[in-house]
Image (cartoon, rainbow, N blue to C red):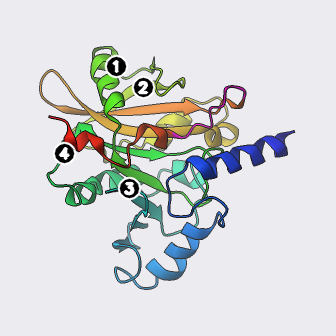
Amino acid sequence: MKKITWAIGIMAGALVCGCIARAGSSPDVLWHIVHEKCAVQANAGPCEETDTHAGYAVLKDRVGVGQYLLIPTQRVTGVEDPLVTRPDAPDYFAYAWRQTARVNGRLPHPLPPEDMSLAINSAYGRSQNQLHIHVDCIRPDIKVALHWASPRLGRDWTDLPLAGHAYRARLISVGDLSGARPFGLLAHDLADPAREMGQHTLVITAVRQPDGQTAFVMLDDRVDIAHGDLASGEELQDHECRIQHFP
């Protein structure tokens, strides 16, 4: 039964994931691109940036106006990989947030931090077995929901249903994501991280606080196969970036 459930999750993930490899292609496409092309032809291959010292490459996704993917240059399967929670692991989310400048570079005018987002799908809600963080605009309705919920958000988790799924939210840092380490924060809250991490999706976005400071929000959802929830945080993003047309 576990193998069947896993297969269902992977097939469904191929349909909802917005990464370069479309449904039906190899789950190792991203790894081959980064390992065999980007890391070999630093900043000259299909990736727009490759930083082997920091351990990541940046690739423009075929889907979306401005969507980018941040991908490790070493083999890292996804949110469940033990490497992501090691103290010496690359600060992938901090590096990914810097790429929001690339998203803005493809838009008619730059958007504020609260219009941007990062998302990594669960092992059940992805089509690729190489960790990749989606960098793109937030859905307008999700931004509105976070705005109204912001007075309730703090350092502890708060239930926050979004997109019909049982997300929870918490503030993680102010001003900068460097050192916030969302993977580690999630693992710290799980009873058995080694078994549970792959069932979770993480989304990072920003909210404007009453004092004018920008605070980062971490959103987490867990796989619930019975209710059709594959924990694909990418669902909170808008690859058409319609929020750019809002006043």
Which residue has dot 1 on it?
Answer: 153
What's the mark number on residue 169? 2
Residue type for callout 2? Ala
- Magenta residues span 226-232
| SS assignment at label 2 | strand
What's the mark number on residue 64? 3
Residue type for callout 4? Leu
State the image quarter where residue 221 is shown.
top right
On the image, the x and y values in percent for residue 173 come to 30, 35
Q: Residue at x 41, y 73 (%)?
A: 52
Q: Is 85 situated left or right of 106 in this image? A: right
Q: Is 236 situated left or right of 178 in this image? A: right
Q: CA distance from mark 2 to mark 1?
A: 7 Å
Q: Is 37 situated left or right of 214 in this image? A: right
On the image, the x and y values in percent for residue 69 come to 42, 59
Q: CA distance from mark 1 to mark 3?
A: 30 Å
Label 2 vs 4, first from the N-terminus: 4
| SS assignment at label 1 | loop
**Mark 3 Cα shell of 10 Å, populated few (<14), some (14-19), many (≥20):** some
Labels 3, 2: front one: 3
Label 1 vs 4, first from the N-terminus: 4
Q: Residue at x 29, y 25 (%)?
A: 144
Principal SS element in the magenta part? loop
Q: Is 134 or 72 nearer to us in this picture? A: 134
Quadrant of the image containing the C terminus: top left
Any magenta on residue 230?
yes
Residue type for callout 3? Gly
Which residue has dot 4 on it?
Answer: 111
- Looking at the image, residue 55 lies above or below residue 221: below
Residue 155 visible here = yes
**Mark 1 Cα shell of 10 Å, populated few (<14), some (14-19), many (≥20):** some
- Looking at the image, residue 223 lies above or below residue 28: above
